[in-house]
Image (cartoon, grey):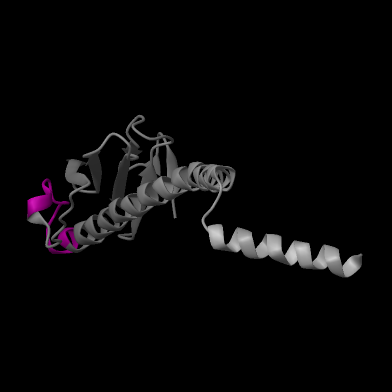
Amino acid sequence: MKTEFTAKYLQHLNKKNKDGGFTLIELLVVIIIVGVLAAIALPSFLNQIGKARGSEAKSSLGTMNRSQQAYRLENSAFASASSLLDAKITSKFYSYSVASSGPNFAVHDTAPQQTDLKDYASAVLQGTNDSFTQVICESGDVAGAAANNTATASNAAACTAGKEID
């Protein structure tokens, strides 16, 4: 009896293998699993793209701060326009500008070219002991309020909105 069952089972498996292909249920299960994985992974992937573009802004603002320091050492005030700086900054995601400047400070601002990017700003200040302090600020949310900075002769460079970036 046992051998008869085994023989019939093997015949059934052989017949099934000849038919080949997948059943509709098997295909639907695979499509559902792929859809769930895509729904989980896609937002995370898009978030990483935004972070990479934000890194570009932070790096460029750091370069502008260092260029302002070099400009200030050679001149009696900070540069009033980014075109006066030696830094060559090009970007397709942000535009950069000197928001304000004076003999002891300079404030830089970014303008995101897309609505899904965070706003950044930076400031550099020359203190009374001729040392420089700088800060880069990030807005709290995407397409939120500008990451405003304050830099005056009486205080250190600081964020007035958003958060300070190390």
In the shown orientation, is residue 4 left or right of residue 160?
A: right
What segment is highlighted magenta in the picture?
71-83
Classify the position of the N terminus by image quarter. bottom right
Is residue 34 depicted above or below 65 in this figure?
Answer: above
The image shows residue 131 at horizontal and vertical percentages of 33, 60
Q: Residue furthest bottom?
A: 3
Is residue 135 depicted above or below 146 in this figure?
Answer: below
Count of marks overlaid on the render: 0
The image shows residue 164 at horizontal and vertical percentages of 44, 46
Residue 80 seen by the camera: yes
Going 56% across and 46% down the picture, which residue do you hit?
Answer: 33
Q: Magenta stretch: residue 3 in it?
A: no
Classify the position of the C terminus by image quarter. bottom left
Q: Residue furthest right?
A: 1
Going 35% across and 29% down the picture, which residue do you hit?
Answer: 145
Q: Report the front residue among 38 and 10.
A: 10
Residue 151 seen by the camera: no
Q: Residue furthest left?
A: 83
Q: Report the front residue among 78 and 107.
A: 107
Q: Report the front residue among 65 and 21.
A: 21
The image shows residue 81 at horizontal and vertical percentages of 11, 47
Q: Residue furthest top?
A: 145
Going 58% across and 43% down the picture, which residue do you hit?
Answer: 25
Q: Report the front residue among 108 and 57.
A: 57
Q: Magenta stretch: residue 75 in it?
A: yes
Q: Please identify the quarter of the rendering in which residue 6 is found.
A: bottom right
The image shows residue 129 at horizontal and vertical percentages of 34, 59
